[in-house]
Image (spheres, grey):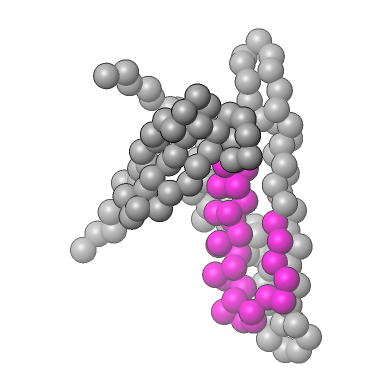
Amino acid sequence: MAEDSARSVEITRLGLGSYEAVNPRGGRIRFGAKGDDFTPVELLLAAIAGCTAADVDYITVKRSEPSGFRVRMSGTKIRDTEGNRLEDLHMTFEVTFPDGEAGDAARAALPSAVERSHDRLCTVSRTVAHGTPVTVEVR
C-alpha cells in the first residue's frame, strides 16, 4: 500500500492573536502573535530545525546514542518592498557522542547526515529553499 502523502493541520482561533493547531492524529500546539506561546515565525524556525534534527538523529543513532543533542535555528526578520520575510537563516548543530568506537562512528557520520538532510531529506527546509508557492482560498 502506498504511503499517504497528504499532510494537513487545522487552525482554530482561541482569542485575539491566539490559536491552536491540530493535526489529524490529535496532536495540538498553541501559538500566537503575542504572549508566552510560540509565534508563527518561531514555529517555522522550529519546523526547519526539527526536521533536520530528526533526520540526523535517525541516521547517527544507528551508530551510537548521543550524549548531547542541541540544534539552534535563527533568522533575521525583515520588511521591505517585497513584504515581510526571514533572511539569513542559520542552523547550528551541537551533537556529542560518548567515547569509543560507536561514538567515533557516529561523529564521523554526523557531517554527512546534516548534509543529506539539508540537501535532500528534510521536507521542511527543502520546501522553503525550493520556494513552493502557497495558494489561499476564502470560503
Position of residue 89 measured from the top left corner of the image (x, y, whole percent)? 70, 39
Tell whether 122 sits left or right of 100.
Answer: left
Q: Nearer the viewer, residue 104 or 73?
A: 73
35 lies above or below 118: above
Residue at the far right: name it.
Answer: 99
Position of residue 88 measured from the top left corner of the image (x, y, whole percent)? 73, 35
Residue plotted at (47% across, 28% down): 15
Identify the image quadrant of residue 77: top right
Position of residue 1 measured from the top left corner of the image (x, y, whole percent)? 21, 63
Quarter the C terminus occupies: top left
Position of residue 78 measured from the top left corner of the image (x, y, whole percent)? 71, 23
**Can see residue 68?**
yes
Q: Nearer the viewer, residue 18 or 135?
A: 18
Count up the numbered dots. Answer: 0
Identify the image quadrant of residue 50: bottom right
Residue plotted at (44% across, 33% down): 14
Tell whether 30 sits left or right of 82.
Answer: left
**Can see residue 5?**
no
Q: Nearer the viewer, residue 69 or 60?
A: 69
Q: Which residues are magenta?
A: 42-71
Residue at the far top: name it.
Answer: 81
113 lies above or below 62: above
Residue at the far front: name it.
Answer: 15
Q: What predominant SS class does the magenta segment belong to? A: helix
Residue at the far bottom: name it.
Answer: 100
61 falls in the magenta region: yes
105 falls in the magenta region: no
1 lies above or below 81: below
Q: Nearer the viewer, residue 91 or 130?
A: 91
Residue plotted at (68% across, 86% down): 102
Tell whether 121 sits left or right of 110.
Answer: left
